[in-house]
Amino acid sequence: MAANVGGVSCWSVVGPSCDELTQTAAMWSVPGVDGVGEQLLGRRATPMRVVARFLGTAAAAATWETNVRALIQTLISAEDDWGRTTTRLRVRGAAPMTLEARARPGTVYECVGTIVLDVARV
């Protein structure tokens, strides 16, 4: 199984945690009235981070970064390194890509591109 984020193939995908949606509530009070009230706001998820990595040439990593950045403000599914798929993820933003140079004996120079995506389950 190949790791991917929103259909964009990756060398490695770590996260997201598969937290389910939990009920949230807000407490409120009115000046001059004893007691407090509570209002149920619905089910929400906490923001999570997905770390996506790409292994290849610098030119291919630049193209990969463009494809991953195109996922911002869309709903995606992510498949991690273990083959677990998490669906209904809204990509809220992405950190700048970091590149790490790697050289393998007898091959061309390669690099590892890493992007951290800020996602939330919807």
Image (cartoon, grey):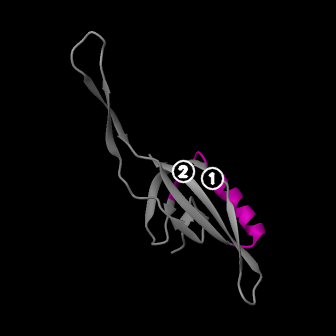
Residue found farthest to the bottom: 106
Per the image, the residue denoted by label 2 is 118
Q: Residue at x 76, y 79 (%)?
A: 109
The reply, left or right, for residue 101 in relation to residue 71 is: right
Residue 24: quadrant of the picture: top left
Is residue 98 positioned above or below 25 on the image?
Answer: below
Q: Is residue 7 part of the magenta span, yes or no? A: no
- Magenta stretch: give its range: 56-77
Residue found farthest to the top: 32
Q: Is residue 75 part of the magenta span, yes or no? A: yes
Residue 3: where, in percent of width, then height?
Answer: 54, 69
**Residue 60 shows up from this direction:** yes
Which amino acid type is shown beneath numbered disc 1? Ala
Residue 33: where, in percent of width, then height?
Answer: 24, 12
Characterize the local packing of mark 1: few (<14), some (14-19) or many (20 or more) Cα atoms within 10 angstroms: few
Label 2's element? strand
Report the number of numbered marks: 2
Whole-Å distance between the Cαs marked 1 and 2? Answer: 8 Å
Residue 95: image tag: 1
Q: Residue at x 42, y 46 (%)?
A: 46
Q: Residue at x 70, y 65 (%)?
A: 99
Residue 101: where, in percent of width, then height?
Answer: 72, 73
The reply to whether the C-beta atoms of the residues labelled 1 and 2 are less than 8 Å apart is: yes
**Residue 9 shows up from this direction:** no
Residue found farthest to the left: 34
Residue 107: image tag: none
